[in-house]
Structure formats: structure tokens, C-alpha cells
Amino acid sequence: ETGVTQTPRHLVMGMTNKKSLKCEQHLGHNAMYWYKQSAKKPLELMFVYNFKEQTENNSVPSRFSPECPNSSHLFLHLHTLQPEDSALYLCASRDDSSYEQYFGPGTRLTVT
Amino acid sequence: GENVEQHPSTLSVQEGDSAVIKCTYSDSASNYFPWYKQELGKGPQLIIDIRSNVGEKKDQRIAVTLNKTAKHFSLHITETQPEDSAVYFCAARGYSTLTFGKGTMLLVSP
């Protein structure tokens, strides 16, 4: 788990709050991903960044706002979320020369 | 886009038995098929993968087979142990991203 770290591990927020999730990868990779994992559903890709540039936005609502200041860090800024946004949010990274994605432990988000 | 179906959704076996999880995919252009293991409270961990130019790959007790014609691939775990209990996900890589199956909860009873 030391390859990709995520903070916080657990987060409870109200619908009017603003919070941010943080991901850091220590693998020297240049691609980073945000996924949403809900019970009994496949992992849903949200955003992809390559060399700090967003290359994919999978029709994610604007209440989720990603930020990638450098190849090692990825943030997901949250505001005015809905209860159905409660889920495990996973970050992953990949080296451009490989297909292998490595996941962090996730942030368990509960929206009340 | 790619669509990945995974079966079964739950699988219970006795310690020492074999376990097989199957996935099908829809995009014939998909060329990379990883399997992930997710334990409670952890993120998915890559356990084995296979490229489309290979039919089978083995790593100790774990093996993956790929049938490109039928567009299906399978994970085989032999001599299962209680620590193999987890949720297993298959995935297929199409143009640039991975599409995941819904997962299989494997329970290995001592």
C-alpha cells in the first residue's frame, strides 16, 4: 500500500460541505486515475490524468472537481454532494510504458 | 464501448478445492486482461494479467486463460486457502481504459 496512498481513509460530510480527497503515488508513474466503487456495481472510471493533463472525464457531475498539480499528486475536490455519492473513492496510477494500474486503499466517503 | 460480464457473483469452496471465475468481454479490440483481488478495507491488488497474444499464464497457484475467439477469460485458483477469501475483479482494456466486471466474492472455508 505504500506505492499509492490516499487521505483521508474515511470522510463523513454534509451535503453543503466542501472537502478534498488526496492521492499520492511514489512509483514514478505518469498517469493517475479516480474511480468510484459502489456496492454491487463495477468500478466506475471518473477521471484520467496523463502527465498532469486531463485526458478523460467520464461524464462526471461538476460537483466533483479533479486537480493534478504534478505527476505524483491527484486531488478530488467535493462540493454540494448528494447521498448517492457515498462510496469508496479509489485512486490508481500507471506508468505510460505499461498497462498495469496500481490502486490506493481508497477513501470511504459518506454523505449525510 | 466495452462491456465485461463476470460470473459467479459469489463462490464458496472448501479449503484445498479449486475455484474458477469467468468473464466475457464485448470489444474484440481489447488486448489486456488483468485480475484484481480486493480484501476488506483495502484497494484492489493486481494478482495476474494476460495479453491478447497469449492463451494462458500461470503464477504458482493462480492461472488465467484467454479465449479470444469466444471473447472470454477465466481465473483459476488451485489448492485454495482461507487467505484467498476476497472479492476478485476481472477487467478488459479497450482503446485506453479498463472496464471492470462486477466482482466475485470468494469464500474459502477451513
Image (cartoon, rainbow, N blue to C red):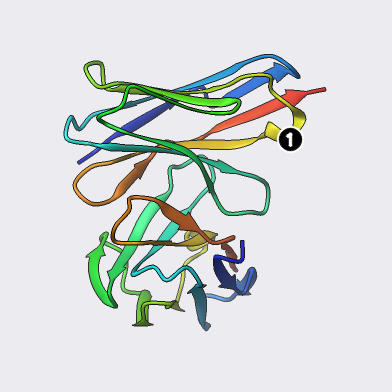
Q: Is residue A79 visible?
A: no
Quadrant holding the N terminus of chain A: bottom right
Image coordinates of residue B65 in percent, x first then y, are: 40, 21
The amino acid type of the residue labelled 1 equals: Glu
Q: Is residue A55 left or right of residue A78?
A: left
Q: Is residue B71 visible?
A: yes
Label 1: few (<14), some or many (≥20) within 10 Å? few
Image coordinates of residue B83 in percent, x first then y, are: 73, 35
The answer to whether A103 is drawn above or below residue B27 in the figure is below
The answer to whether A29 is drawn above or below residue B68 in the figure is below
Quarter of image, res B24:
top left
Q: Is residue B59 left or right of residue B50?
A: right
Image point (33%, 33%), residue name: B4
Disc 1 sits on a residue from what chain? B
**Residue ID for mark 1:** B83
Image point (69%, 23%), residue name: B80
Image coordinates of residue A90 in percent, x first then y, are: 49, 60
Quarter of image, res B77:
top right
Q: Is residue A79 left or right of residue A99?
A: right
Image point (60%, 25%), residue name: B61
